[in-house]
Structures are given as C-alpha cells and as structure tokens.
Amino acid sequence: MTYVIAEPCVDVTDRACVSVCPVDCIHEEEGDRTLYIEPNECIDCGACEPECPVNAIFTEDALPPQWAVYTEINALWYTDKAAARAMVDKAKPR
C-alpha cells in the first residue's frame, strides 16, 4: 500500500480526494465512518494527499505511528468490510 487514510478522516469523510483520484481507488459505502484507499489499485500518484482538508492521507512510510493500524484497516475493508468497520470503531470510539 502506498497511501493510507488515517484517523483525521474518521467521521469527516470529505470527498475532495475522491474527485482527484485518476484511478478511482478511494471508496466508502453508506454508513462508513471513513474513506478507504484500495492498496492494489493505488498508483502512488499523490493527487489525493494535498486535497485532503483534514490532512488524513499519508504515504505508508510517513504515517504517524499512533495511526499505524489504519494501514491494516484500509486493506482489510476490501476483503472484510465488517471487520474493518469494527477496527475503526475500536481505534476511534464514538
């Protein structure tokens, strides 16, 4: 995974990053508390990062340690949405 959407996006889900992604690799479904980057589709272009108004998008190697779990959460959402949502709730309770 090259880019990760971290905790600042939780409960914000501003979609500015979605509109600039050239490969449409940023997703969410109704009821999600955050957006997710599909790690196998992301082309590492970086277009999304400056568009995020809450500075929630990081390259994997620049992700602050306190948000490291979001690397797993982003990838997991594409194989087990319920598990990813549970991890978001655990990482940032309502």
Image (cartoon, rainbow, N blue to C red):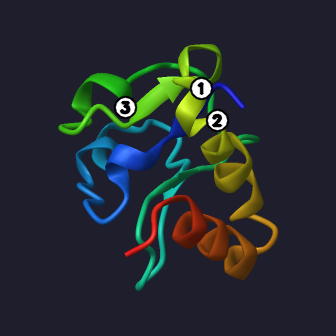
Q: What residue is drawn where x is 76% and y is 59%? A: 76
**Mark 3 surroundings within 10 Å by alpha-carbon count, few (fewer than 14), some (14 through 19), many (20 or more):** many
Location of residue 34 in the rendering, given as x and y in whole percent from the top left corner: 42, 62
Whether pointer 2 and pointer 1 mark residues with C-beta atoms closer than 8 Å, the reply is: yes
Mark 3 or mark 1, which is nearer the start of the sequence? Answer: 3
Q: Which mark is in front, 1 or 3? A: 1
Q: Which mark is in front, 3 or 2? A: 2
- The quadrant of the rendering that contains the C terminus is bottom left
| Left or right: 77, with 7 as reference point | right
- The quadrant of the rendering that contains the N terminus is top right
Q: CA distance from mark 3 to mark 2?
A: 19 Å
Query: Which residue is under mark 3?
Result: 48
Query: Which residue is under mark 2?
Result: 68
Q: Which mark is residue 65?
A: 1
The amino acid pointed to by label 1 is Pro
Viewer-closest of 62 and 28: 62
Question: Splitting the image into 4 quarters, where does residue 85 fall?
Answer: bottom right
Whether pointer 3 and pointer 2 mark residues with C-beta atoms closer than 8 Å, the reply is: no
The amino acid pointed to by label 3 is Cys
Disc 3 on helix, strand or loop?
A: loop
| Left or right: 40, with 66 as reference point | right
| Left or right: 38, with 17 as reference point | right
